Image (spheres, helix red, strand yellow):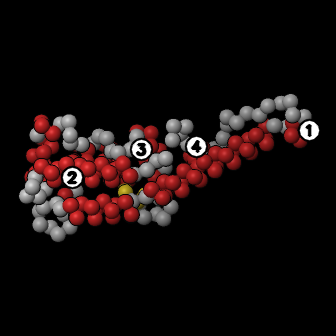
Amino acid sequence: MTSLSGIYAGLNSTYAYLASQYKDGLTLENIAEARTNTDNLMNLNQTFASYLQTNFSALDADGDGVLSADETTNSISQMSASGLTKAQLIQLYSSGASGISSEDYSYIIENFESMDTNGDGRITDSEIAAFKLTAAKMEKEDEMNNRAATNISVFYGDDSSSSSSGSYSILSYKYKTNSKS
């Protein structure tokens, strides 16, 4: 199932990796240095490091110039509770691996406004799950409606014809889920 937890885990582990390298605290300069250090190429997720660097001032809640574990944990917990904006998702994905698959990312971006049921401009894991449940329900209803409409033998009492379930209504097309989901 599509979930944003990979993003939150990626941010958390990237912070932990960076913080382990800088015992005096993680500063904006430390992140920039770590991102250009060739020794970090195999261990540092550039996507999440870029996000931490770009959003440093928002993450540094007390404004002391050092990103603490508590500040990072609180920010990630707040993100998880309130959800991510479309801009945040695009920023994370455009800079590389975002913690979710390309198929899931495309599905979320294409359906973002429909998933955002409370209209706050953010989507949460629960909104994604609710949308996917609705999509699966609509797909099943379309399949059943199509089967009933194409299987005239039900009306005439002849069960020798077969039904086709390959077509969907134009209204429910947006709910059509990816078979890999």
Q: Residues within 10 Å of mark 3 (few under 14, many from 20)?
A: some
What is the x, y in percent for residue 59? 22, 61
Sequence-first disc among 1 and 2: 2
Q: Which residue is mark 4?
A: 176
Give the vertical position of 161 relative to 144 (above or below). above
Q: Residues within 10 Å of mark 1 (few under 14, many from 20)?
A: few
What is the x, y in percent for residue 24? 7, 58
Q: For the point 36% across and 48% down, which residue is it?
A: 6
Q: Looking at the image, can residue 60 be seen?
A: yes
Sequence-first disc among 3 and 4: 3
Labels 4, 2: front one? 2
Q: CA distance from mark 4 to mark 1?
A: 31 Å
Q: Looking at the image, can residue 91 be seen?
A: no
Sequence-first disc among 3 and 2: 2
Which label was assigned to residue 16?
2
Q: CA distance from mark 1 to mark 3?
A: 46 Å
Q: For the point 74% across and 45% down, which residue is it?
A: 145
Task: Determine whether label 3 and label 2 are within 8 Å by CB.
Answer: no
Q: Which residue is mark 3?
A: 105
Labels 4, 1: front one? 1
Q: Which residue is mark 1?
A: 157
The residue under label 2 is which amino acid type? Ala
The residue under label 3 is which amino acid type? Tyr
Name the secondary structure under disc 2. Answer: helix
